Amino acid sequence: MREFSVAAVVDVPRNTNTTDLVLRQANKASNPALFARLDAQKHWVDITATAFRDDVSALAKGLMAFGINAGDRVGIMARTRYEWSLVDFAIWFAGAVSVPIYETSSPSQVAWNLGDSGAVAVFAETAHHENMVRQAVTAESLTALAHVWRLEGAGLDELRTAGRDIPDAQLEERRTSSGLSDLATIIYTSGTTGRPKGCELTHGNFVELSDNALGVLSDVVPEGSQTIMFLPLAHVFARFISVLAVAAGAKVAHTPDIKNLLSDLQSFQPTFILAVPRVFEKIYNSAALKAESEGKGKIFARAADTAIAYSRARQNGSVPFLLKVSHAVFDRLVYVKLRTAMGGHIKHAVSGGGPLGERLGHFFQGIGLQILEGYGLTETTAPVTVNHPALIRIGTVGAPLPGNAVKIADDGEILAKGVSVMRGYWGRNDLTAEAFADGWLHTGDIGELDADGFLRITGRKKEIIVTAGGKNVVPAMLEDQIRADALISQCVVLGDQRPFISALVTLDEEALPKWAAAHGLPAGISMQNAIVHDTVVGAVQRAVDKANESVSHAESIKAFRIVPTDFTESSGHLTPSMKIKRSQVLKDFDALVEEIYAAKKPV
């Protein structure tokens, strides 16, 4: 199969924009809760559609009173919190364009996003964020940026007060000034391959994609369902799901600190969640290490194998009787505890931002949590394809959503077209022309389509390694398997124009203490000592050997080194969406790489 398209199931009027999604819910007799916030007593308090509409309108009037015009760009720099979505929709109600900025961004990144977009104002969460914005304004002479409002403190009240004299009719004129083809937001790419590019996403990208996605995901995100958002809203994945929830009348809570995620899951009890694969890997690995530390490692391993076998059998259409019995036993002993730890009510999870892996997908499906893996880019408003309850094939990223199409080029590159695809790169007609061919967006990813239109990602075009011997190697195939090990955090496979394939591996600092205790290592062993300990090196070698079984001898990893520090966003080696900055890793650990290849070539 070289091309697969799915017709749109919803025809959206051309004068529609994202603000109409709020009014859709506010005009319902049910007046569903769209958000929930923790009060001072740590109780979740609902925010109804009408209450949200009224506050968004008040803030939008304030923006207008401060001179924000239709089409003006307004930045948002904050952690994931309710106010992020509040000001996002207020910007849209005022006819303006929002520009997300990761709250972890450096001053130079802040300056680039604000300067390149020509932002005239910005919302900053805290004094720290405000200072960073003002430093950027001064350093880069961003004369267009006239206003900075703080989300904490009196900043929003200042806007509410300023807008009191703006007539409702004037706001309505501004709110309805945008249609499907108009610009809604400029989201900058995370910059794994150079300067971030501003992706122009329209109101149509959000509205048409949301309504068409709900055509196949109505069982996942029905009115009254609820989720807790912990991924950064500056990233397109969380941003789209947040808008999708408003379109559906679902409720969204927020937790800015992932350290509180477990308690927030248990108190809020979401019915669906979204996460990147690393979160699911950590959930699995934490459960496995906990069982091992309690002397129940063998039981958990059997339970995991049973869950995977059960899911595979169901997908194939028939579950043997004895497997059903074993699954029922482990459901009472193990699986129910895992579901309870995640709040007890989650039925579905949406995974994106990278490959999940077939084994992990079957594990969660087998314990009663259906993970719907999807695929997309910032340039595609997140999902182009996704598995959904009625059409799922674990190990793939699903078929195109209604209104989208996928095509495989002659060199294996995935091309995309449809309601999710951006209109271009902000201010860069040259890059836009380079990215599109005959209306198809070149994604840069490599994949294949099966006969039913399910897409499987096999690698990243720019990351394909060509060894000195001319062998093409897709690093992701090895990296994903090695990273799934409970002890390992990150893995970067190397070998471009080198005589053999090697890897840099980091250990999971959170998992190390429990793993060390279970394997007889000294209590409190340091990372420096752990990376040279025979037991640790042997465990990493076994993970590498297992991954090597899935590739040919020429593609297998012949040597590795364990790096003494993890690859993180703060270290500059991961993007905010948890993608490896491969060039930065190679630059910072060049000496270690040269050490690998200075040694005699492995057999």
Image (cartoon, rainbow, N blue to C red):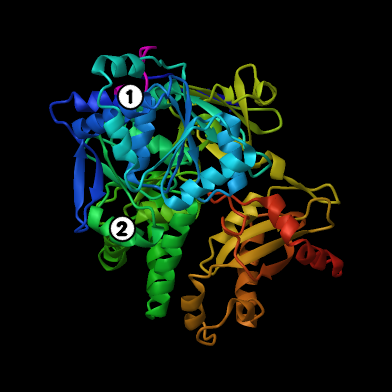
Q: Amino acid at mark 1?
A: Thr
Magenta range? 10-20
Residue beneath the point at 82% across and 64% down: 594
Task: Residue 247 in the image: state x and y as whole percent.
Answer: 30, 29
Any part of residue 206 in sight: yes
Q: Quadrant of residue 558?
A: bottom right
For image coordinates 59% across by 26% down, the residue present is: 426
Mark 2, mark 1: which one is toward the viewer? 1
Of residues 302 and 182, which is closer to you in this image? Answer: 182
Q: Is residue 428 above or below residue 242?
A: above
Task: Please state which amino acid type lies under the numbered disc 2.
Answer: Met
Q: Position of residue 98 (x, y in %)?
A: 45, 31
* Depth check, front residue: 481 or 598: 598
Q: Which residue is mark 1?
A: 19
x and y percentages locating residue 267 in the rendered image? 23, 57
Report how far apart the C-alphas of labels 2 and 1 lie in the structure: 32 Å
- Residue at 49% from the left image edge and 71% from the top image edge: 511
The numbered mark at residue 220 is none
- Indicate the quadrant where residue 386 lies: top left
Most frequent secondary structure within the magenta stretch: loop
Q: Secondary structure at mark 2?
A: loop
Vertical comparison of 395 with 285: above or below: above
Q: Looking at the rendered structure, which numbered label has been put on residue 342? A: 2
Q: Is residue 44 left or right of residue 522?
A: left
Quadrant containing the N terminus is: top right
